[in-house]
Image (cartoon, grey):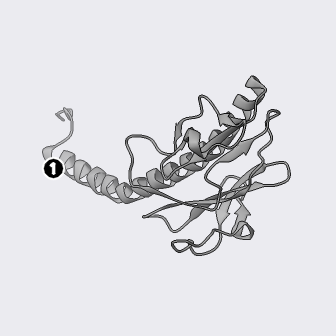
Amino acid sequence: MKRASAGFSLVELMVTVAVVGIIASLATPDSASDRDRLQLDAAARRLQLGLERARLAARRAQQACGISLDSEAWVEPEQQDLSGELTPCSGIGLSLQEALEQGPIDVHTNLPEVIRVSANGLLLDGGTTVLSHERLARSLCLVVSLPLGVSRVGVYQGDLPELGEAPRSTLCQPRAQGG
């Protein structure tokens, strides 16, 4: 008479747990790289979103305003940095990265200290900003083109600008679909 099996043996369970552990450990480095890539992508979206918020604030108030980019966020410029009738764009404070960061996002830009936005929402100043992450080879960029202040996000195809060197808009190439 045959006895029915009541379950798995201890050896079978230990082998299964070991195999699952090995597979999980192989996936860990890729997930860290994915988090870094997602963090860089989010910073690029927030960079563009800050400009859109400023445009919206100017149109809503029907008044020209200014916005500034520092190394970590879009901020309202100091009053002494504003010229003439220009006021700070209200409600535009936006950090480029979340509080639970995986690593610092470096910002290289040749945007002016204060970016002016007309009362009808046109960006009056242009330039290029490059965002990089210390653990990623790829850098993302944002170009604000004049005369209408159209902005586009892409992948920076050159070496990162040295200290004091301006990023070049010609090196900011559009991203491939899905990338």
Which of the 4 image quadrants contains residue 22? bottom left
Residue 77 seen anywhere in this rendered image of the structure: no
**Horizontal and vertical percent for residue 153?**
69, 54
SS under mark 1: helix
Q: Residue at x 37, y 42 (%)?
A: 100
Q: Nearer the viewer, residue 92 or 18?
A: 92
Residue 17 seen anywhere in this rendered image of the structure: yes
Residue at the right extreme?
147
Which of the 4 image quadrants contains residue 88? top right
Q: Nearer the viewer, residue 116 or 153?
A: 116
Q: Residue at x 72, y 44 (%)?
A: 116
Crowding near the residue tagged with mark 1, few <14, some 14–19, many ≥20 C-alpha atoms within 10 Å: few
**Horizontal and vertical percent for residue 85?**
72, 35
Q: Residue at x 59, y 28 (%)?
A: 91
Q: Identity of the amino acid at label 1?
A: Val
**Image height check: is 99 above or below 140?**
above
Could you tell me how many numbered marks the image carries? 1
**Horizontal and vertical percent for residue 73?**
51, 44
**Image quadrant for the C terminus?**
bottom right
Answer left or right for 33 relative to 20: right
**Image height check: is 154 above or below 97?**
below
Answer left or right for 154 relative to 71: right
Answer left or right for 96 relative to 158: left
Q: Nearer the viewer, residue 98 or 66?
A: 66
**Image quadrant for the N terminus?**
top left
**Horizontal and vertical percent for residue 118?**
79, 38
Q: Which residue is mark 1?
A: 11
Which of the 4 image quadrants contains residue 26? bottom left
